[in-house]
Image (tube, helix red, strand yellow):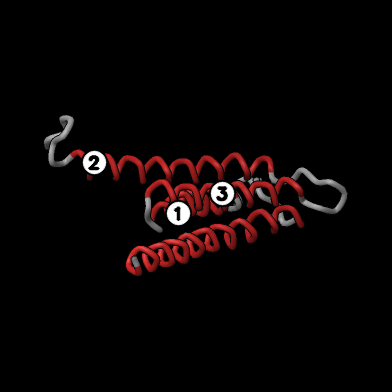
Amino acid sequence: MNVTAGGKGTGTLFNVAVYGMLFVLGAVLGVIGSFQYSWMAGPVPVAALAWCAVLLATCLLAAWAMRSVSGALAPAAGWILAAFLMSMPVSNGSVIITNTAAGRWYLYGGTVTAVAGALLAFVVMIRSQGRTRAR
């Protein structure tokens, strides 16, 4: 394996590393959000909605940085895996993400946000390729 600067395999190795780090970033967002989602302002689950916005921004920025839809899918997949693992009960009965309004907004809203981020990145990539071809 040639990993020296300017080597033939450097680009592929770098891309794999970046996609792996984006997956880990999404997982970290999922784990931290699983403990912080329940902050409320009256009946509004402000923290859950804020975490959804952060996830959307992360997916869109990752797609922009990688110049591919896969950039949005990596943090989305990491978030979904981490958040849903944190919502599963353990043998002693403890649950991290509870069945409350904030918990539902965090899990389901986050999932919809992750899918929306990937779809929005896809639409933006298709439109930008169409503009490039039209020139």
Q: CA distance from mark 1 to mark 2?
A: 19 Å
Decide which of tag 1 and tag 3 comes sooner along the chain: 3
Q: Which residue is mark 2?
A: 13
Q: CA distance from mark 1 to mark 3?
A: 10 Å
Residue closest to the eye, 100 or 50: 50
Count up the numbered dots: 3
**In which quadrant of the rendered image does the N terminus lie?**
top left
Residue pointed to by mark 3: 57
Tell me residue 2's x, y (percent).
Answer: 12, 35
**Would you say 122 lies left or right of 108 here?**
left
Q: Quadrant of the C terminus?
A: bottom left
Kind of residue sitting beneath label 3? Ala
Q: Residue 95: x percent and y percent?
A: 65, 48
Q: Amino acid at mark 2?
A: Leu
Q: Position of residue 50 (x, y in %)?
A: 68, 47
**Residue 85 — which label?**
none
Going by the numbered disc 1, the residue's amino acid type is: Ala
Q: Quadrant of residue 16?
A: top left
Badge 3 element: helix
Q: Secondary structure at mark 2?
A: helix
Residue at image position (63%, 61%) is: 108
Bin the neighbour count of mark 1 within 10 Å (Cα to Cα): few under 14, some 14-19, many 20 and up. Answer: many
Q: Is residue 29 above or below residue 102?
A: above
* Residue at which label 1 appears: 72
